[in-house]
Image (cartoon, helix red, strand yellow):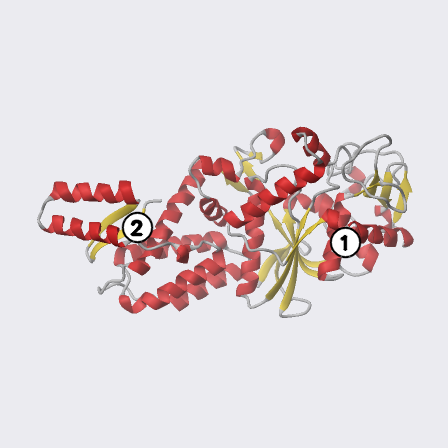
């Protein structure tokens, strides 16, 4: 298994610490608002990684977090907690907002056929672990207390700037991090924030330093260590996490344990709409519901995501989504050939070779665009030649393997019922009798009433679903 590793800035061979088990931590959503397609690109890519690791005969142990407290409106530990902001916006408590959008996220995962992590963990369920880790950091001289919270002293951690290749000397107040005169260093970040005096927060806890709530970064370190150990194999997230969130995770985790935090870092690149990064503030954050209202299923979005590589900056457009829809229609047309086996001179299908080709592309740095092009070529060939009865069993196995590797659910496409079969046979009789008007009417009936398209081939009629 090969993967581009942000830590080394090269494609590395992935070797688990304790094979055949491989540990993976994925930064999950901050559940204060709807999950938009920019987020879904990231999560489908993480799902693809898990499928690739399984294809490489590794046993995955996967943790995804739910950030339901501590993520402020600025990544620089300034501003309002996003959950508190969401609560004010919707006239609900922060706890209610967190549940609403956590449930929506889980539902979206199911719609997109994203595998379920072994552990989905919430920050609010692990306050004790976060407090314990902060205590360790203070005891080791990495943490200090000022008027608004407990902070991490980045100057004490050698190599703080290395992961993201930061130039700390050029950072200006109000740029990457906000200016706070009490902080020892501009890049220091909050481990624990105190509740503002006179405030009435929905989410706050007692701590040895005062009532408040954890910083965004500490939750991932504490939960990752609890479930996966002090060193994990692969840490995943969006590329925007590199300079702040993941840099801070490394600093606090390695300071606390004295060990490397993660051996491999996989980052999903940005997604843009009309040349701009997807953002709620820009009003270009498209949700799954928005797609469905325009007639695009979550399956189409999944295909659209697989058509791009996780390292490349992807440009979302409605045209690209329409192209993905057409590709999915062709793949589904290929899939229903399992119900239409024919004795013909159809090309022999080497399903085992096809499966191996897809696996090889997948475990070589998740080359999903090449896989989708390969599948389209296969579909075009089979739709022209038909499927021989001799290849039926291996083709069914092939569809199951494609589903397992890519999550496309091609093997779940249903057969037509007897009534539709009878209509197709009637149309053939009408064509044999050269009753072209009747055969054309029957074709329209199949399409309009049953969502079935009939195609005439040299080997006889074939059909496909029209959705």
Disc 2 + disc 1, Cβ < 8 Å: no
Tell me the quarter of the image containing the C terminus.
Answer: top left
Q: Relative to 11, does residue 446 appear above or below in the rendering?
A: above
Kind of element beneath mark 1: helix
Q: Residue at x 63, y 46 (%)?
A: 238
Q: Residue at x 40, y 65 (%)?
A: 397
- Using the image as rendered, state which of residue 258 and residue 227 is in the foreground: 227
Numbered badge on residue 114: none
Q: Relative to 291, does residue 423 appear above or below in the rendering?
A: below
Q: As drawn, is 83 to the left or to the right of 186?
A: left
Q: Residue at x 70, y 40 (%)?
A: 95
Give the image quarter of residue 168: top right
Percent of width and height locating residue 49: 57, 57
- Using the image as rendered, state which of residue 281 and residue 12 is in the foreground: 281
Kind of element beneath mark 2: strand
Numbered badge on residue 464: 2
Mark 2 to mark 1: distance in Å? 51 Å
Q: Is residue 159 visible?
A: no
Percent of width and height locating residue 428: 16, 51
Q: Is residue 255 visible?
A: yes
Labels 2 and 1: the sequence-earlier one:
1
Percent of width and height locating residue 444: 23, 41
Percent of width and height locating residue 377: 36, 55
Q: What is the count of numbered marks?
A: 2
Q: Residues within 10 Å of mark 1 (few under 14, many from 20)?
A: many
Q: As drawn, is 248 to the left or to the right of 290?
A: right
Q: As drawn, is 223 to the left or to the right of 280?
A: right
Q: Residues within 10 Å of mark 2 (few under 14, many from 20)?
A: many
Q: As drawn, is 447 to the left or to the right of 210?
A: left
Please give the residue where the numbered disc 1 appears in the rendered image: 222
């Amino acid at each position: 298994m090969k993967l581009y590793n942000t830590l080394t800035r090269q494609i590395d061979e992935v070797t688990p610490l304790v094979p055949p088990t491989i540990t993976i931590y994925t930064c999950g959503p901050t559940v204060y608002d709807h999950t938009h397609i920019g987020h879904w690109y990231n999560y489908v890519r993480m799902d693809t990684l898990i499928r690739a690791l399984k294809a490489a005969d590794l046993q995955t142990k996967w943790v995804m977090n739910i950030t339901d407290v501590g993520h402020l409106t600025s990544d620089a530990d300034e501003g309002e907690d996003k959950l508190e902001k969401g609560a004010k916006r919707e006239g609900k408590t922060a706890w209610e907002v967190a549940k609403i959008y956590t449930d929506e996220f889980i539902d979206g995962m199911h719609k997109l056929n994203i595998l379920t992590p072994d552990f989905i963990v919430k920050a609010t369920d692990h306050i004790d672990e976060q407090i314990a880790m902060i205590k360790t950091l203070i005891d080791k001289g990495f943490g200090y207390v000022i008027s608004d919270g407990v902070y991490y002293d980045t100057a004490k951690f050698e190599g703080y700037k290395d992961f993201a290749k930061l130039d700390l000397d050029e950072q200006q107040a109000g740029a990457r991090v906000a200016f706070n005169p009490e902080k020892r260093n501009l890049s220091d970040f909050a481990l624990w924030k105190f509740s503002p005096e006179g405030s009435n927060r929905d989410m706050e806890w007692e701590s040895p330093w005062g009532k408040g709530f954890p910083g965004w970064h500490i939750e991932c370190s504490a939960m990752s260590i609890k479930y996966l150990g002090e060193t994990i194999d692969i840490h995943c997230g969006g590329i925007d996490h590199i300079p702040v969130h993941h840099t801070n995770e490394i600093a606090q985790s390695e300071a606390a344990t004295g060990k490397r935090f993660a051996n491999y870092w996989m980052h999903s690149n940005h997604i843009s709409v009309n040349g701009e990064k997807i953002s709620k503030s820009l009003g270009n954050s498209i949700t799954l519901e928005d797609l469905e209202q325009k007639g695009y299923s979550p399956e189409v979005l999944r295909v659209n995501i697989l058509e791009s590589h996780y390292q490349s900056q992807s440009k979302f457009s409605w045209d690209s989504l329409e192209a993905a829809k057409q590709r999915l229609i062709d793949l589904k047309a290929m899939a229903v050939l399992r119900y239409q086996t024919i004795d013909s001179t159809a090309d022999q299908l080497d399903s085992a070779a096809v499966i191996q080709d897809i696996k090889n592309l997948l475990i070589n740095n998740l080359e999903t665009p090449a896989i989708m092009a390969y599948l389209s070529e296969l579909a075009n060939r089979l739709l022209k030649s038909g499927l021989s009865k001799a290849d039926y069993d291996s083709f069914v196995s092939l569809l199951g393997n494609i589903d397992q590797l890519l999550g496309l659910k091609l093997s779940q496409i249903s057969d037509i019922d007897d009534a539709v079969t009878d209509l197709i046979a009637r149309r053939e009789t009408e064509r044999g009798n050269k009753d072209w008007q009747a055969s054309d009417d029957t074709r329209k009936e199949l399409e309009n009433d049953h969502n079935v398209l009939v195609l005439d081939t040299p080997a006889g009629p074939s059909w496909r679903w029209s959705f």
